């Protein structure tokens, strides 16, 4: 069969011509296969039996050309921690040289960190609560849309009949779990706020006493004053008894100074002239 040189058939015409020439029935469309039962073929034999149809063959997974963003760990711009810079400044050495100043500064820093942590926990709780509310609404909306689609596509077998094995029929409700975690965070926030106002030592030391918080605080302040007075009395008593002993010890250690003796001139007896005493 001779064809003219200027004849440029379309791909579909070429497919039909190839089918007529070879006796094989091709799909005539790029990417489509003959699906007969549970098998797919690039061409079908004219002697085959059964029902076949054209369709796409796709794997059960999705293949992406690029990785999703946000999963890779970028290199840090600074290897050393910022705490090393804080530890190298002059204030740290000042706190080490003066313990009283260091203890007070550390207490102020702890209070600042407590405030920052409280603000962070409150903001996290608010954000998580907002996300939980939004997810609950999205879950309810998706279930309603799914029910509507099932009603519309009931004649064709529903949504899963069209989607196949990747059909999702259940959305897990994590409302109770998230709410439980939020309640735990609220409890930790209350404990941290109590520590911020009362301190760790007072809270644990007077927790066994009955009554309200101001009674425990009053007892704690009274005990502190009593201990301070007792220590001062003991100190003064020790000073009264030890001061004379210390003075005697210091006096015994000092050298004894004797007065310097000066010689007295006495003339000899021959030079002494007796003078008569007139009566």
Image (cartoon, rainbow, N blue to C red):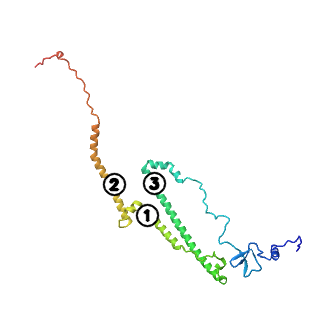
Badge 1: residue crowd in 10 Å (few <14, some 14–19, many ≥20): few
Pointer 3 and pointer 1: residues touching (CB < 8 Å)? no
3D distance between C-alphas at marks 2 and 1:
26 Å
**On residue 228, which mark appears?**
2
Left or right: where 27 falls relative to 65: right
Which quarter shows the N terminus?
bottom right
Pointer 2 and pointer 1: residues touching (CB < 8 Å)? no
Q: Position of residue 100 (x, y in %)?
A: 42, 51
Front position in the image: 250 or 63: 63
> Disc 3 marks which residue?
106
Badge 2: residue crowd in 10 Å (few <14, some 14–19, many ≥20): few
Left or right: where 206 falls relative to 164: left
Mark 1 lies on a secondary structure that is: helix
Mark 2 lies on a secondary structure that is: helix
The residue sitting at 50% across, 48% down in the picture is: 90
Which quarter shows the C terminus?
top left
- Quarter of image, res 220: bottom left
Left or right: where 2 falls relative to 25: right
Task: Give the mark, 2 or 1, whose residue is nearer the N terminus.
Answer: 1
**On residue 194, which mark appears?**
1
3D distance between C-alphas at marks 3 and 2:
24 Å
Query: Which is in the foreground here, disc 3 or disc 2?
Result: 3
Task: Give the mark, 3 or 2, whose residue is nearer the N terminus.
Answer: 3
Mark 3 lies on a secondary structure that is: helix
3D distance between C-alphas at marks 3 and 1:
19 Å
- Quarter of image, res 31: bottom right
Q: Position of residue 113 (x, y in %)?
A: 49, 58
Front position in the image: 239 or 162: 162
């Amino acid at each position: 069969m001779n064809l003219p040189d200027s004849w440029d058939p379309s791909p579909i015409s070429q497919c039909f011509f190839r089918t007529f020439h070879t006796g094989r029935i091709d799909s005539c469309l790029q990417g489509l296969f003959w699906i007969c039962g549970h098998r797919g073929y690039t061409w079908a034999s004219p002697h085959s039996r059964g029902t076949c149809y054209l369709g796409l063959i796709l794997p059960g997974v999705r293949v992406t050309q690029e990785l999703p963003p946000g999963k890779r760990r970028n290199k840090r711009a600074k290897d050393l921690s910022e705490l090393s810079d804080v530890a190298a400044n002059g204030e740290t050495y000042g706190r080490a040289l003066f313990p009283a100043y260091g203890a007070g500064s550390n207490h102020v820093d702890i209070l600042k960190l407590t405030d920052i942590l409280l603000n962070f926990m409150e903001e996290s709780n608010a954000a998580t609560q907002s996300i939980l509310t939004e997810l609950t609404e999205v879950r309810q909306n998706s279930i309603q849309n799914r029910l509507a689609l099932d009603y519309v596509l009931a004649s064709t077998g529903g949504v899963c009949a069209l989607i196949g094995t990747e059909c999702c029929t259940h959305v897990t409700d994590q409302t109770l779990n998230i709410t439980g975690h939020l309640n735990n965070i609220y409890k930790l926030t209350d404990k941290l706020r109590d520590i911020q106002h009362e301190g760790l030592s007072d809270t644990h030391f007077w927790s066994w006493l009955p009554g309200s918080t101001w009674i425990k605080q009053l007892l704690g302040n009274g005990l502190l004053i009593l201990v301070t007075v007792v220590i001062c009395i003991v100190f003064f008593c020790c000073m009264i008894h030890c001061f004379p002993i210390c003075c005697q010890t210091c006096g015994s250690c000092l050298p004894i100074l004797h007065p310097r003796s000066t010689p007295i001139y006495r003339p000899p007896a021959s030079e002494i002239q007796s003078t008569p005493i007139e009566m």
